[in-house]
Image (cartoon, grey):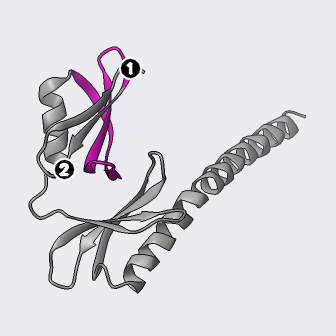
Amino acid sequence: MKQWVTFILGFLSFLAVALMIIVIVAGNKPYSDAEQRAIERVKDENLLAEVKQAYVYANKQTAVTVIGTDAKGKLNAIFVPTGEGEVKIAPLDEAMTAKQARKAVAKEAEVKEFLHTRLGMEKDGAVWEVAYKDKEDQLNYIYIMASDGKQWKKILNL
């Protein structure tokens, strides 16, 4: 009898882990599909020769940021809207980097942990969205203009 209980508990544990993996993969699929469509569009329109990374950036209109180099070897960010809208391009050779944006936030705020740093397009231009937790474990966002490193917006203590 003890062997049956052990077998059933082991089987249920395995089933629970398998279901969690399926939920995680299924939940991430829309993001992965949007990123893949954006990469294909950027390559089809010959906007980038090599793609280094892509991720979803959400503001009033969700877009996928695709970062890579063009045919001339210049680093660019391409912002591809998930719905209708035009593709926007921001050159990154002279722009602030993600590392510099995190350093600027760390100088101003007491950062316990950086959650992410994403480049996105806002009405005033390309911005770095730096999300972090402070020492009280509160969620904070600071947006920094990629062109000049000035703060664009803050959302604090969430």
Q: What stretch is highlighted in magenta?
A: 110-139
Q: Overall secondary structure of the magenta stretch?
A: strand
Element marked by disc 1 = loop
The residue positioned 48% from the left and 53% from the top of the image is 62
Q: Residue 138 carries which label?
A: 1
Q: Is residue 58 above or below residue 66?
A: above
**Badge 2 element:** loop
Residue at 21% across, 21% down: 110
- Residue 80 in picture, x, y percent from top left: 42, 66
The kind of residue tagged 2 is Ala
**Image height of 62 relative to 140, above or below:** below
Indicate whether residue 125 is drawn in magenta.
Answer: yes
The residue tagged 2 is 146
Query: Which residue extends farthest right?
Result: 1
Q: Which quadrant of the structure image shows residue 144?
A: top left
Residue nearest the viewer, comparing 93 with 84: 84
Q: Quadrant of residue 13?
A: top right
| Residue 94 drawn in magenta | no
* Label 1: few (<14), some (14–19) or many (≥20) C-alpha neighbours in 10 Å: few
- Residue 155, compared with residue 18, is above or below; it is above
Q: What residue type is labelled 1?
A: Gln
